[in-house]
Amino acid sequence: MLCTLILALLTNPAFAQALPYHSDPSAREILPSLTPVPAIRFLTTADFPPFNFRDASGELIGFNIDLAKRICAEANVACTIQAWPWEQAASALADSQGDALIAGLAMTDENGAQFDFSSIYLALPGRFVTRAPDIGVFDANALAGKTVSVRAGSTHETFLTRYLPDVTLARFDSEIAALEAVEDGKADAFFGDAMRASFWLNENLTCCGFAGEPYFRPNLFGEGLSIAVPAGHDAVRHAIDWALVKLKDNGTLDELYLRWFPVGFY
């Protein structure tokens, strides 16, 4: 077992990764809000592991849960975290039943009409995955004529057809099926959402790994994860942004990322 883990660590450079700094570097100079924020009532959901879910004992845990607690501690405010069904969470925030929603609410124009958003705390790049022996020699510019698996109808398929039109696409109904095609030798590489691919790689340590660089395309893959607050609640949003800067600079964000994502996706 130990030998297997060591081999995976050697062949997969995605381990022991630090989290990139997603905010504008000038945000390091941000000052704490002068408007008092006595508490932050976080809303979330309980059905999106490893971000927010319940463990066997029913306790709410996950990356977002730990992050919310650390934000409150850094901002020195009282903190509550309440889980709502996904279809009700945004409405609960709009009805002032919470101060902030940390559940991956998309930053669409429709949501932007009701909510303001914190800075990005986790960007979601696209990544290539190959079999382990091919990681070191992978070159995205040399994929012409090669077969790349992808989830059919995804924005990652759009990316490939737009930027790498000479590759042969193998379209699958799910990311899992597309990744398994690489494992089985039916495709030379996979391209898709790096975060979801990291979950699969965590269960297939000796088979495959990320290859090449991450691709950040907000217009295709989304801006990333941020925290929603009711529009105009600038004091709460400012306190969250200030805490996020501090948590990145003191290493806490890296610690949480490594804890919940053992196979880093950057």
Image: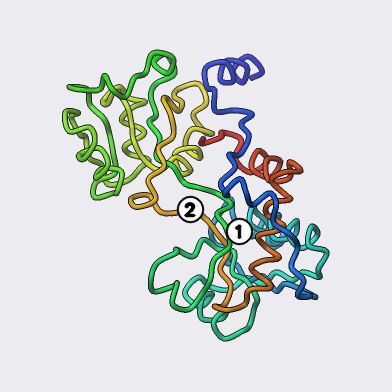
Residue that mark 1 sits on: 52
Within-10-Å neighbours for mark 1: few <14, some 14–19, many 20+ = many
Name the image quarter holding residue 254.
top right
Q: Residue at x 62, y 49 (%)?
A: 26
Within-10-Å neighbours for mark 2: few <14, some 14–19, many 20+ = many
Q: Amino acid at mark 2?
A: Gly
Task: Using the image, determine if residue 132 lies above or below residue 98.
Answer: above
Instruction: Provide residue 35's location: percent of width, then percent of height.
Output: 75, 75
Q: Quadrant of the N terminus?
A: top right
Instruction: Provide residue 8's location: percent of width, then percent of height.
Output: 56, 20
N-terminal label among 1 and 2: 1
Q: Amino acid at mark 1?
A: Asn
Q: Which mark is residue 224?
A: 2
Task: Using the image, determine if residue 226 lies above or below residue 191.
Answer: below
Element assignment for label 1: strand
Name the image quarter holding residue 262.
top right
* Left or right of 206 in this view: 143: left
Which residue sits furthest bottom? 95
Q: Is residue 56 visible?
A: no
Task: Using the image, determine if residue 11 lies above or below residue 17.
Answer: above
